[in-house]
Image (cartoon, helix red, strand yellow):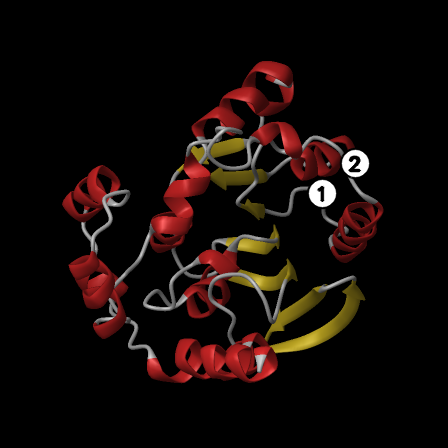
Amino acid sequence: MKTISIYLKKIINTFLTPRVYNFIVTKKFYQNYSENYKKKNLLKKILKKIFYFYPNLNDSLDWSQGNKEVKRSFEEFEILADHDKFILDFIVDKFQNKDSKILDLACNQGRHLKYLYNRGFSNLYGVDLMHSAIDRLKKTNQSMSENINLSVDYMQEYLNSKEENYFDGIYTFGATIELIHPSYDIIKNLVRVSRKYIFLHISENFQTYPRFYRYEFKKNKAKLIYYKKFGNKSFLVFEKN
């Protein structure tokens, strides 16, 4: 039954959810949502089920707090695991030009950025919604952070603000894009702002909004060139056609 449930969710998130995010979400929307998202009542639950396609920011806002008492904090993301080093070395091998413009999407306190910075990359970007994580990065790695373009923002808004082919490559380590409500076309925008590569370490069949990632990338003219499994997560590398 669990397999069927996941499959149905992937169908809904990939094929049946209209991408209405950019038509609905404004700065006022963010403000109102952040002030009221914790308020729960029966009517709200019913409306959420009926209007399933309406933009939902709950998962992002939960993570934004960086409070261990409420949700996972930046303190849990300090050490590089073996799979992190494998993926980062893979990225290093793909970019011979150390001035390549690379984005860490949902960078938290920047352990992956630090690795690339120490390998000589000089044009790095990082975005995360957790203020405390970005503050931690700036305080503990001051000289590095002064040479990295850091932003505190929703990844939807951040990607929307970038022009086509802005980055040479984008990478993210889950759970990140799996928490983005399907009303926002995250795959389309990842492909749009990347000139060459997109590296994903994600749960293809878990987290809040599973979808047919490989189909969506192919639909947006990015081909899968590498795949490796790490436990219940996948390392997927897409190249823009």
**Which amino acid type is marked by label 1?**
Lys
Q: Callout 2, which amino acid?
A: Arg
Note whether residue 77 is visible: yes
Q: Compared with residue 157, is residue 50 higher up or lower down, i.e. above or below?
A: below
SS at badge 1: loop
97 left or right of 71 in image: right
Report x, y in % for residue 80.
77, 38
Question: Looking at the image, is 76 positioned above or below residue 205?
Answer: above
Density class for disc 2 (Cα within 10 Å; few <14, some 14-19, many ≥20) is few
Instruction: Give the quarter of the image for residue 204.
Output: bottom right
Distance of mark 1 from mark 2, alpha carbons? 9 Å
Mark 1 or mark 2, whichever is nearer to me: 2
For this view, does 37 lie left or right of residue 216?
left
- Image quarter in which the N terminus is found: bottom right
Q: Mark 1 points at which residue?
A: 98
Q: Which quadrant, please, contains the C terminus? A: bottom right
Residue at image x 35%, y 64%?
184
Q: Position of residue 147 (x, y in %)?
A: 58, 26
Who comes first in sequence, dot 1 or dot 2? 1
Q: Is residue 220 visible?
A: no
Which residue is under mark 2?
Answer: 119
Please, is residue 35 above or below residue 21 in the view?
A: above
Taking the spot 54% from the left edge, 61% from the top edge, the residue there is 207
Residue 200: x and y in percent read 64, 60
The furthest residue to the front: 42
Q: How many labels does the image show?
A: 2
Q: Element type at marker 2?
A: loop
